[in-house]
Image: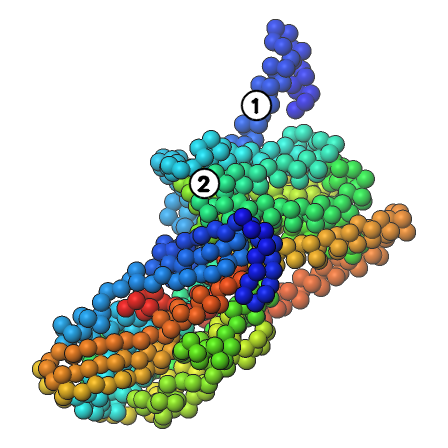
Amino acid sequence: MSLELEFDDGREVFATEEMTLNMGPQHPSTHGVLRFIIRADGEVMRSAKADVGYLHRSIEKIAEKVGWRGFMPYTDRVDYVAAMTTNQAWAMAAEVLGGVTVPRRGEYCRVIAAELGRICSHLLAAGAMGMDIGAITPFTHAVRERELINDLLEELCGARLTFNYMRVGGVAWDLPPGFGAKVLRFLDHFEPYVDELDDLLSNNKIYIERLAGVAVVTRERAIAYNLVGPNLRASGVKYDIRKHLPYSVYPEFEFDVPIGMGLHGSVGDCWDRYIVRLHEMRQSARILRQALEGLPEGPVIAKVPRNYKPAAGEIHVHVETPRGDQSWYVVADGTEYPYRVHIRTGSFAAMSIIEELSRGLMVADLVALIASFDIVAPEVDR
Amino acid sequence: MQAYLDAVATGYPTLPPFVVYLLGMLAFGALVVFVFILPVAGITSWVERRVWARIQSRIGPNRVGPGGFLQWLADGLKNLLKEDVIPAAVDVPLFRLAPYVVVAGFCAAFVALPFAGSLIIADLNIGILYVSAITSLVVIGILMAGWSSNNKWSMLGGIRSATQIICYEIPVGLSIFPAVLLSGTLSMQGIVAAQGWAPTSWHMFHSPFLFVAFVMFFVGALAEGNRTPFDLPEADSELVAGFATEYSGMRSLLFFLAEWGNLYVIGVLVSTLFMGGWQVPRFTDNTTLLTVAQFATMFLKAYFWVFVAMWVRATLPRVRVDQFMTLCWKYMVPIGLVNVIGTAVVMVMLPNGSAVLRWMMAAVAVAILVQFARRVRFHLRRADYGRLGRISEDPA
C-alpha cells in the first residue's frame, strides 16, 4: 500500500490502495453497452481503459452477403441515433462505384432528411449530457423536441428510428405533400427552443463548473488522435466534411462551422464539445430553411437496374454524420455483392483518447467525458 | 402527553410505572409513524413525481386513484411483496440493519419537531441539537449500507455520504446558531415562541446575517437530505445507485422513504428556525381551532420548502465531490462564522431588534422574489407546445 502517488504530470496526491472498478457493460451512463476498466484511487482515476466490442454485429461482413441494395437497412443499425447520414454514406459509396447520378431533388431530399437527423442526434446528445451531469429536466425537454422530428420523419419514410429512407440512386419516397410547411413550422418552434436550452442548461453555473476546463483536448492532440466532427471542432479545428470535402448539394447552402472558443475554460474542454453541438443545431436549421426554399422539381431517384452491379474498383467515401467524419471504404469486384466494406466512425475515434484524458480525473468527470464525446456504443463496434 | 401518561400510571397501581410509560411511548410512537410520518413521506413521493413530471413536460403517475394519488400505496405494497434479495457476498447483519437505521434516524427526528403550539411529542430543552444529532444517524445507516454491500459503487456512495456529513454539518450548525442566539433557547417551541406570526417578526428578517444564515441552512439541509445538487451518495448517473445499488424490494424503498420523509423534516426545520414555525394570529380563543390553524400553517410552510427542494432537484445539475467540499469549507464555514459574530454584534447594538431593519430585510426578500419571478417569466417561452400538438397534423 503506497501512500504517495505521482501522476504523469508530476502532481502528487495522498494515495491509498488502488481499486479496480468496472464501469459497464451495464451502467446507466455509458450510453449503450460499453465497458470501462477504471483503476481508481478513491474517486480519483489513474486510468479508464475502454473495452469495446459488446455490440459488435458484423455489419461490415453482412454487407458482403446481402448485396448493394439489400445492405441499406443494415446501415441504419450502424448508428441508430442518426441513421439518415449512415444511409447516405452507403448510398454515396454505391453510386460513385456504379457511376449513378442522383437527381437534384433526390439530393435535396437527402439533405433535408440528414439535417433533421442531425438535429435529432444533437438534441439527444445535449440532453444526455445534462442527464449525466445530474440535471434531469433538459433530457426530457430535448426528447420532447426530438419527438416532433420523429413525427416528421415518420411521415417521410414510415419509420421513427431506423429509417431506411435512402436508396442507391436517390431516395425511396418524395416528400409528402405539405411536408415543407410542416418542417418550417417546426423550425419556427425549434430555433427559440435552442435558446431556451441555453438558459436551462448551457449557462447554468453548476453545469459550467462541472464541464469547463475538464478533459481538455488541445488542437494537436485532437488531430493526433484523429478526432472527427464536433469533437474535433471543439478543439478549435475548423473542419467539416460538408464544407471541406463537399458532397451532395451542400456547397449550395450557406452555413457556418462552429468551433470551440473556450468561453468558460480552455478550448477543447467538455463544455466546448457540448456547445459546439448546440450551435450546429442552429446551423442545421439554417440549411433546412435554404433546402426547403430551393427545393427543385423532378424525380427523386435515378433509374438503377434491379440487379445492381457496379464495376470493380474501390472507393473511400466521407460523410459528416452528427458524430463526425464517417468514412466508408468499399471495394467492389464487379459482382452483385461488395467485396469488402469498412466503416470508420466518429465514436470509435473518440474512444481511443478517453484513456489518456481520464488520468487524474474523478469518476464523476468520466461520465461527463463520455457524454461530451457523444459516444454511441453501436457505432463504436458496428 | 406526559400529563396523560402520569395520570394513567397513577390510575393503574398494579402496573409498574415504567411499563406504562414504555407502552404509552410505543403506542404514541407507532401512531405518529403510521398516521403521520409514513403517509407524509409516501405522499411526498407522489407529489415529487407529479411536480417533476410537470417541469419535464410529462404527465407522471396518474393511474392509481384520482390523479394517481394512491400510487405511493401501490408502490409500497408492491415493494413489500417483492423478494428481499440479499446477495451472497454481503455482510448480512449490517446489510439487513442499514435501512432500519436510516428510517429510525429520520423518524426519531419527529420527536422534537413542533407541529403546533400544543402538538409536539417532546419539547426537549435541547430540541434543535437533538434533531441535528439524530438525523446524522441516517448517514451511519447509509455508510453501513455502502460498506456491507460488498460493491465498489455502493462503497463509493457510502464514503461520499460520510465525506458529505463532515462538510455540511458544520455550516448547518453555524447557521442554526444565529437563530438560537436570538431565541436564547435550544428548545424548538422556544425558538418558535421567540418569533411572531407576521413575516417581519420572523428570525429570517432580523438582520442581514440571519437572512444569509437562512439561505445557508437551506443549502446545507439539501445536502443533509441527499438532494440534488448534492445527491452525491446516490448519484444515479455516476454510481449506478450509490449505497442503494445492491438493495431491492422494501429495503430499497426504505431508503427512499427516509429521503422523502427527510424533505419534510428539512421543511419543518427551516420554518421553525427562520420562518416563525406554527405562529398564527390569535384569531380565536378556541384552543382546538387554534391548534388546527397552527398545524396547517406549519404544514404549509414546511411543504413550501419541500416543493422548492423538488423544484431545485428537477432543475439543477449535480456538483462534484471536491466542489461540494470547497463550497462547504472555503465559503460556507467562514460565512457562517461571520454570521454568528455579526448576529451577536447586532444583538448587542439593538437589544430589541429594529423594526426598520426588519422591514428593510423583508423588502429585500420581496425584491429578490420579484426579480426571480421576472427572470423566470422572461425565460418562460410562450407555452406554445400545447397549441403545436403533433407537428404532423396539418396546420389548421
Q: Is residue A212 above or below residue B1?
A: below
Q: Amino acid at mark 2?
A: Ser
Return the residue at label 1: B26
Looking at the image, is B106 positioned above or below residue A78?
A: above
Residue kind at label 1, given as amino acid type: Leu
Residue A90: x %, y % from top left: 24, 80
- Looking at the rendered image, the disc whose residue lies closer to the viewer, 1 or 2, is 2
Q: Residue B305: horizontal and vertical position, in percent?
A: 61, 50
Q: Look at the image and tell me whether residue A8 can be seen.
A: yes
Chain bearing mark 2 = B
Left or right: A95 as drawn, with respect to B135:
left
In contact (CB < 8 Å): disc 1 and disc 2: no
Residue B383, position as x, y percentages in the image = 48, 69
Left or right of B314, for residue B131: right
Q: Quadrant of residue B285?
A: top right
Instruction: Identify the residue shown where x is 50% and y is 80%.
Output: A219
Task: Provide the chain ID for the residue under circle 1.
Answer: B
> Can the viewer see residue A290?
no
User: What SS does tag 1 mark?
Assistant: helix
The residue lying toward the viewer, choosing from B359 and A286, is A286
Question: Would you place residue B347 above or below residue B395 in this image?
Answer: above
Colour setup of the view: rainbow
CA neighbours of label 1 inside 10 A, class few (<14), some (14 to 19), many (20+): few
- Same-chain check, marks 1 and 2: yes
Tell me the residue at 37%/85% (across/down): A241
Residue at the image point whose x is 11% and y is 80% from the top: A336
Mark 1 to mark 2: distance in Å?
32 Å
